Image (tube, rainbow, N blue to C red):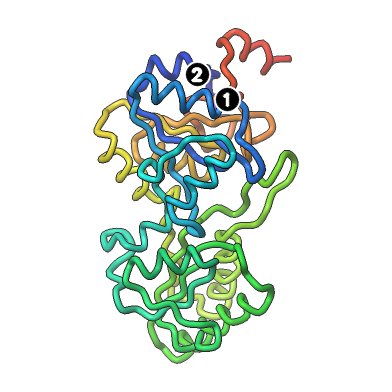
Amino acid sequence: MTDLAPLIDLPSLRARYEGFLLDAYGVLVDRERALPGAVALLEELEHAGCPWRVLTNAASRLPEELSETFAALGLSIPAERILTSGSLLAEPAVSGDLRGIRALVLGPAGAHRYAERAGIIPVPFEEALDAEALIIADQQDLRWPEHMDLAASLLVHRLDAGLPLRLLLCNPDLIYPVAPGRVGLTAGALAAMLEAIIRERWPDQGIGFVRLGKPAPALFEIARRQLGVTRLVMLGDQLATDIVGARAAGIDAVLVGTGLAPASGRAATAIRPTWVLPSLAVESSQAAADRASA
């Protein structure tokens, strides 16, 4: 059995690391509020001049829009500190050259703006079968089941005819925290449904979505270049995206016990964070240990 990840507190993390990477939903906020300790952490990092970035699998709103949303929840996060998976559509080294590609884009207006900034031509739903690419950006504003029916129809139309179809997934997350005790489905769950169709209908073609966001390495590599420090740490609430992605990129990872972290926090799993932090609310290591063993 995998060893339990050791507990740590924020003062100890601050002493160990030169730069911080922070997940947004589940670590700093949920859909309704800033999570306990988030405001104080960002203020402390700013006051200390410690470089930091927010890494999010968001592709429904541009960084400047996310900054406004966070501000409404009481968090000061400038747009230039936010790295989103949607922005990777404009990174040819990550997504390939998409300029001039006609794409069916699943997601709200912000997702279409990400696509347009990358030189992609979003097609209206009534022209879905003319698309050369399918981009699943976000579940927001999805009309169920009509839009997913069109996406499945595009798969059948192109792949049965032997035509190429580029498949890109901005947000690989399957679920996200809505409020305490509540979750919602995300874009990754939509892609999983379509990939099930691909495996059944075209089992020998090896086709699947190119995943842009965490745990893919691109966001971590961009953040490391921007921060320019050696001792980086990622704080996240999802083992399969935040923790796996950071560790694969050679970055220490902290599983924060809010959001979608396992209820036990320190459960022994095959995916092992470097540390476990029960909450962003500051407490001593001994207090954290006492609370975890209670």
| Any part of residue 117 in sight | yes
Q: Is residue 203 above or below residue 54?
A: below
Q: Is residue 62 above or below residue 231?
A: below
Q: Nearer the viewer, residue 73 or 250?
A: 73
Which of the 4 image quadrants contains residue 86? Answer: bottom left
Residue 199 at x, y percent in the picture: 54, 72
| Measured Cα–Cα span from mark 2 to mark 1 | 10 Å
Residue 25 at x, y percent in the picture: 56, 42
Q: Amino acid at mark 2?
A: Leu
Quadrant assignment for the C terminus: top right
Which of the 4 image quadrants contains residue 16? Answer: top left
Q: Is residue 101 above or below residue 282?
A: below
For the point 34% across and 35% down, the residue is: 250
Label 2 with label 1: CB-CB less than 8 Å: yes
Q: Which residue matches tag 1?
A: 37
Q: Which residue matches tag 2?
A: 10
